[in-house]
Image (cartoon, grey):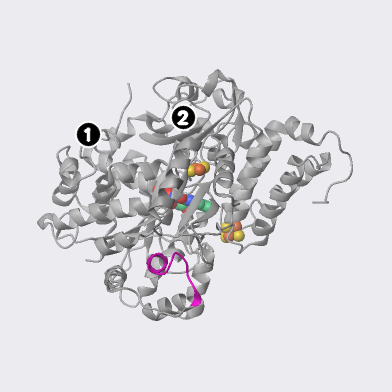
Amino acid sequence: MDKEVRFSDDALQLVNRITSRYPEGKQKSAILPVLHIAQAEFDGWLPVPVMDYVAGLLRMQTIEVYEVASFYSMFNLKPVGKCLIEVCHTGPCWLSGSDGLLSYIEKKIGIKPGETSPDGMFTLKTVECLASCGTAPMMQIGEKYHERLTDEKCGEILDACRENGERVTHWSVKRIQNDKA
Amino acid sequence: MSVKLLFEHLDKPGIRNLEGYRSHGGYQTLEKALRTLKPDDITGEVKKSGLRGRGGAGFPTGMKWGFLAKPEGVPRYLVCNADESEPGTFKDRYLMEHIPHLLIEGMAISSFALGAETSYIYIRGEMMYVYHILQAAIDEAYANNLLGSNIMGSGFSLDLHVHCGAGAYICGEETALLESLEGKRGNPRIKPPFPAVKGLWGCPTVVNNVETISAVVPIVRDGGDAYARIGIGRSTGTKLISASGHINNPGVYEIELGLPVEEFIYSEQWCGGITKGKKLKAVVAGGSSVPVLPAELILKTAAGEPRLMTYESLSDGGFETGTMLGSGGFIVMDEDTSIVKNLWNFTRFYHHESCGQCSPCREGTGWMEKVLHKILAGKGTRADIDLLWDIQKNIEGKTICPLGEAAAWPVAAAIRHFRAEFEELTSQITEPAGQV
Ligand SMILES: Cc1cc2nc3c(=O)[nH]c(=O)nc-3n(C[C@H](O)[C@H](O)[C@H](O)COP(=O)(O)O)c2cc1C
Ligand code: SF4
Ligand code: FES
């Protein structure tokens, strides 16, 4: 990474707000929210220098941060496309057509789960039950749940993502600006 | 007729905001609790209500609260389990998204009862947008002296925080959840000590599900006895059921415990029958971890009694012919569904979600997934069915947390009730098992 690893002022303010929710000396509890914020601040994934920076912020050993980052499925340890498409493929979604949805997406953008499109726009990922089984099949992009999907509806959503061209993360940059206070 | 306690005002405009929630009696129960009741009175009402944990295990809530250790000078914590990751379960998300103040009011009343001055809601990270809904509602409550110091002048103070996870089914297990909330990997702890004695940061802690804590509001409002009059026997009150799969009206329903399963599946008021007029094949009644039952056994018990939506009726017959109410994740499968493929899907899920601490769970789930995959690929033998049976037997009871059993039970039930389907897939092949 060439640029200096540092959170924006908004993000730093938000991190302070979050760490104050845990007792004195227990600021390490904030690691999950702070890593989400880190992904929003640094292109949707967690390079080692970013994890080291977070370790410094929360006064943790770097190894503790790596351990946590590698345990939870929402943390990306490799670069991802601007738009991470997370398709649920667990039982109830499968009963309601997630296989068909996945193959539609695979065909439309030409990548398989785990891959990123050559233009860096999309990464496709299968995920486990997102508590949306009654509105299956579904996918998540950023914080948004897209439910009761048909091929057509899904196609429109992906086209809109491409047109918009902005990076989408679970904890969005916009949320960081709103929530800092 | 149906009783609605949690969802009574769900369709009222603005119910998501404080103003809307208050205009339908919101926070009046908190006021009643703080002004007229002592903490132990509230625990007493919860005991009388017969409320059982809605997270899956069905443990009596009042009794759990009674176990909370209260050493002098040590903080106590209430942690709400909003990790909702059990496949087939989506009621907590629905409740929090639509009526967040109900959970917040429940947290405030329950924290007062337990003597907790700081409480947390642990919500799974994927539900980030709900996290922000809850945070906004909490901010509203603080701004109106419904949280924070000296709530409504009662002298009781509470800090309530929402905390987000980051994707791990195992963090729904209460001790893994506490590890995660402490900023670590979600590895379940060996019990004892139980959280009631040593929980969050080593302090006495109660962990309860979103629906459990929300139910405390109507219990304290109407009294435990009134709540206990709803439902049947030891299954008191109402239950949120998440209905999915091959039904005409999937969604979240609040039912009075005791509703016949057949009525729930076929009535227009509820699931509305099987899609495309197909026949019912099987149901997983309480989230992916509970045993699957074939149509005849979900509609009627082995003794021929109508099966009811209660803890007791659903488990009638034990695992031989019964199942569990579990989290209320009601997954319906029509006649065209491959039980073996569905089982493989669930087994892959458990393999993916095993935290890896115990070898029977870590290795067993992976092995079962591979054997099922082989059977589905048409390369399995009859002996593979017995192998699957052996593996699941060797997980049960040999692990730190119940995820091991949650992975084993569905395998056992599928073989028990649908052996013919496994045999069909392996009928051409007779070589010995073992090669995966
Ligand atoms: C693997 C596993 C996953 C679980 N997931 C959840 C969950 O997502 N939500 C929940 O409330 N309870 C879950 N539980 C149950 C909790 O450990 C705990 O029993 C529950 O939160 C207690 O609350 P209750 O008594 O109000 O039900 C899970 C248990 C296990 C073993
Ligand atoms: S049973 Fe599985 S999930 Fe539970 S502690 Fe052991 S390895 Fe982890
Ligand atoms: S199975 Fe896909 S959301 Fe539950």
Q: Quadrant of residue B50?
A: top left
Judge whether residue B89 can be spotted in this image: no
Residue B236 % position (x, y): 38, 34
Foreground pick, B363 / B261: B363
Magenta stretch: give its range.
A34-48
Residue A81 numbered mark, or none:
none
Residue B309 numbered mark, or none:
2
**Which chain does the residue under circle 1 lie in?**
B
Q: Quadrant of the N terminus of chain B?
A: top left
Residue B12 numbered mark, or none:
1
Three-letter amino acid code at the position of disc 2:
Met
Q: Is residue A47 left or right of residue B161?
A: right
| Residue lying at 26% horizontally and 45% vertically, measured from the top left | B102
| Residue lying at 55% horizontally and 36% vertically, measured from the top left | A97
Q: Residues within 10 Å of mark 2 (few under 14, many from 20)?
A: many
Judge whether residue B100 can be spotted in this image: yes
Q: Please, what secondary structure does the residue beneath circle 1 have?
A: loop
Q: Is residue B358 above or below residue B387?
A: below
Q: Is residue A93 above or below residue A47?
A: above
Q: Residues within 10 Å of mark 1 (few under 14, many from 20)?
A: few
